[in-house]
Image: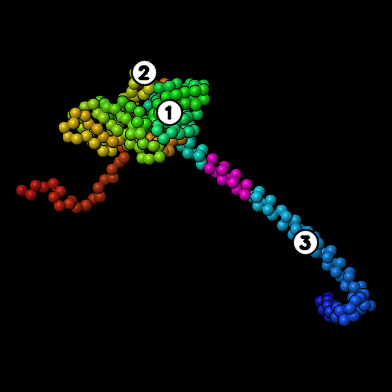
């Protein structure tokens, strides 16, 4: 078959040459048309389905790409929502564990909005129709968050413990030494610290001491025993009538998601039982030589 096509091609070239020399149609040209016409038609019939598929694919390419982009965007959104749900689930689990240890009856809620630049407040998705009332303690799985200040039917405003207008009565863990925590008024986007003032000038105050809520009469606005934070640094001067310090809160105010509103105080004061366990200090490695001057012998 291939030699025949080659011969036909040579004949076609010759016919074209004759046609141009004659300046018009000639009997040879007519013969060439008669010979190659069926072949050209056959080639066109064979190629036409593929040409049609190519044009169809070219025409639909833009819409298919747009559809794939929409699907990818939807999948990314679903993945973000799933990760958010996992984070909320973890926070809810910790909240329920803390509430169980302290005997607090809590109503879980989610943070849906943050306050302005001049106050540390958040809005939760639970309100009076859910049983929320003003002056109720708000906590999460790590510790104290704040108190409810305003309530409507479906949402409520929570004043955070970091707000400059917030004052919380606290007790030093392992003792009956009491004091007050006030907010520094820093924004929620920064490292929040609380200010501690002890009412005793003789109590021992040093970094690492844990604090819990002292509790209000009837459990409003604060229930007793909620973990507040640990002393970071002592700021009072020797001889001062009051002792002051900076406290790092247990709750991370930059990552609040799920919180719990305490709708009923515990039957008994949980005291220090809700505090997180103290970090364990790894034992010293054996054979470690003491530094000069620290051998423990007087040398006498």
Residue with the mark numbered 2: 218
Which range of residues does the magenta coloring cover? 69-82
Can residue 246 be seen here? The reply is yes
Q: Quadrant of residue 27?
A: bottom right
Q: Which residue is mark 3?
A: 51
Secondary element at image label 1: strand
Dominant SS of magenta comes to helix
The vertical placement of 241 against 72, above or below, is above
Nearer the N terminus, badge 1 or badge 3? Answer: 3
In this view, the residue in front, 15 or 87, is: 15
Cα separation between marks 3 and 2? 84 Å
Circle 3 packing at 10 Å, graded few (<14), some (14-19), many (20+), is: few
The extreme top residue here reads 218
Q: Is residue 70 magenta?
A: yes
Residues at marks 1 and 3 touching, judged by CB atoms closer than 8 Å? no
On screen, residue 19 versus residue 260, left or right, reads right
Q: Residues within 10 Å of mark 1 (few under 14, many from 20)?
A: many
x and y, in percent, of residue 234 in the image: 24, 36
Of badges 2 and 1, the one in the foreground is 1
Per the rendering, the mark at residue 158 is: 1
Distance (Cα) linking label 2 and label 1? 20 Å
| Front-lying residue, 174 or 127 | 127
Q: Quadrant of the N terminus?
A: bottom right
**Spatial distance from mark 1 to mark 3, Cα to Cα?**
68 Å
The tag earlier along the polypeptide, 3 or 2, is: 3
Label 3 with label 2: CB-CB less than 8 Å: no
Name the residue at the right extreme.
27
Query: Residue at the location (20% across, 32% down)?
Result: 204
Q: In the structure shown, which secondary structural element does the residue marked by tag 3 occupy?
A: helix
């Amino acid at each position: 078959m291939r030699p025949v096509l080659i011969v036909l091609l040579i004949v076609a070239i010759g016919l074209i040459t004759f046609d141009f020399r004659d300046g018009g149609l000639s009997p040879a040209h007519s013969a060439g048309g008669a010979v190659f016409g069926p072949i050209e038609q056959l080639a066109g019939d064979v190629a036409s389905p593929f040409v049609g598929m190519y044009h169809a694919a070219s025409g639909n390419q833009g819409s298919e790409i747009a559809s794939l982009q929409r699907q990818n965007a939807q999948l990314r959104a679903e993945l973000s929502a799933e990760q958010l749900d996992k984070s909320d689930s973890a926070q809810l689990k910790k909240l329920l564990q803390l509430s169980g240890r302290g005997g607090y009856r809590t109503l879980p809620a989610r943070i849906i909005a943050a306050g302005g630049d001049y106050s540390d407040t958040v809005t939760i998705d639970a309100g009076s129709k859910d049983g929320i009332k003003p002056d109720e303690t708000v906590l999460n799985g790590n510790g104290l968050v704040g108190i409810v200040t305003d309530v409507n039917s479906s949402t409520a405003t929570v004043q955070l413990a970091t707000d400059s207008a917030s004052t919380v009565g606290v007790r030093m863990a392992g003792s009956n030494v009491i004091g007050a925590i006030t907010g520094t008024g820093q924004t929620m986007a920064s490292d929040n610290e609380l200010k501690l003032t002890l009412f005793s000038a003789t109590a021992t105050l040093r970094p690492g001491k844990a604090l819990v809520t002292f509790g209000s009469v009837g459990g409003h606005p604060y229930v007793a025993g909620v973990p507040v934070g640990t002393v970071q640094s002592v700021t009072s001067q020797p001889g001062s009538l009051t002792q002051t310090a900076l406290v790092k809160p247990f709750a991370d105010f930059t990552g609040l998601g799920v919180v719990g509103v305490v709708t009923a105080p515990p039957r008994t004061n949980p005291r220090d039982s809700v505090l997180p366990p103290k970090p364990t200090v790894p034992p010293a490695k054996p054979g470690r030589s003491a530094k000069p001057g620290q051998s423990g012998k007087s040398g006498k």
